[in-house]
Amino acid sequence: MRVAVVQMQIEDGDPAVNLCRAAELINANPGADLYVLPELWTTGYAHGIWSDAARNSTPDICGDVQALAESNHAWIAGSMVSHNAEGHLVNRLWVFSPAKGTPVIYDKGHLFQPMQEHLHLVAGKHRVRHRIGGVETALSICFDLRFPEMYRRDAVDGAELFLVVSEWPHPRSETLCALARARAMENQAYLVLSNRVGLGADGTDFCGGSMVVAPDGAVLADAGDVESVVFAEIDAAKVREMRAAFPVLGLRAEGLDF
């Protein structure tokens, strides 16, 4: 599976502009089986418009991205502020299929208080995995990276690829890289990270550093600190070979009281 990480600048509070930018980046870089956009790629952290965006913009953009996925014959993933079944605002990772059907969704489980998510959103309660391009894929968002038990449970349940969308700022760029590589190598799985880049409306400097990480922790592609699209190949067979040769997951000692 060929993946494309779409590291983009985001115009806070302007879903229409961001949709055009994302579509231009995807259409200008054809040939991927999966395109991954950043966290909250349609609005950024413009809290004041979140409720209106979830009600009015997100449903329409879902239709636009589904059409984009079909025209590019590719999966497209990225998170948008949305309403859950109970009508509460959530930070939802949407994954659209190249074929018409119901999108796969994951609601961010670990809300990031420094960006005031807990004041506007409710946390998701469930981990989500889905088979994308023949690869068992686990979904996660940004701050989730700091909670390794989530990724370990997904790996034990069969995940071969971790999909992470984020809006991770400076000065914690080194932390982002370290956590992404650690989640991949400790679970012997690929990890695809799409992070926002550039300045937010409030002056927050988002660090970029989007990457694709191999099951041994090697960085296969790195988008640096500019708006760009980078590609890498995902081969689930390599995950299975590594896990068979060095069965870390199978050697876990459960129930230890340390």
Image: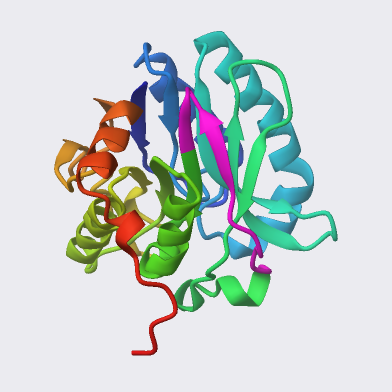
Observer-nearest of 254 and 95: 254
**Residue depicted at 50% across the width and 12% down the height:** 72
Drawn side of residue 99 relative to residue 157, left or right: right
Which residue is situated farthest in the left direction here? 218
Quarter of the image that includes the N terminus? top left
The scheme the figure's colours follow is rainbow
Drawn side of residue 2 relative to residue 18, left or right: left
Which residue is situated farthest in the bottom direction here? 258
Rendered location of residue 202, percent (x, y): 42, 65
The correct choice, above or below, for 103 with respect to 174 in the image is above
The main secondary structure of the magenta stretch is: loop
On the image, which quarter does residue 50 sit in? bottom right
Observer-nearest of 128 and 41: 128
Magenta stretch in the rendered image: 121-136
**Residue depicted at 50% across the width and 18% down the height:** 74
Visible residue check, residue 14: no
Rendered location of residue 31, percent (x, y): 37, 11
**Residue 87 within the segment the image draws in magenta:** no
The correct choice, above or below, for 87 with respect to 101 in the image is below
**Residue depicted at 43% across the width and 19% down the height:** 33
Observer-nearest of 179 and 252: 252
On the image, which quarter does residue 146 sit in? bottom left
Count of numbered badges drawn on the protein: 0
The correct choice, above or below, for 244 with respect to 255 in the image is above
Rendered location of residue 231, percent (x, y): 27, 25
**Residue depicted at 69% across the width and 41% down the height:** 58
Drawn side of residue 143 relative to residue 180, left or right: right
Quarter of the image that includes the C terminus? bottom left
Visible residue check, residue 157: yes
**Residue 132 within the segment the image draws in magenta:** yes
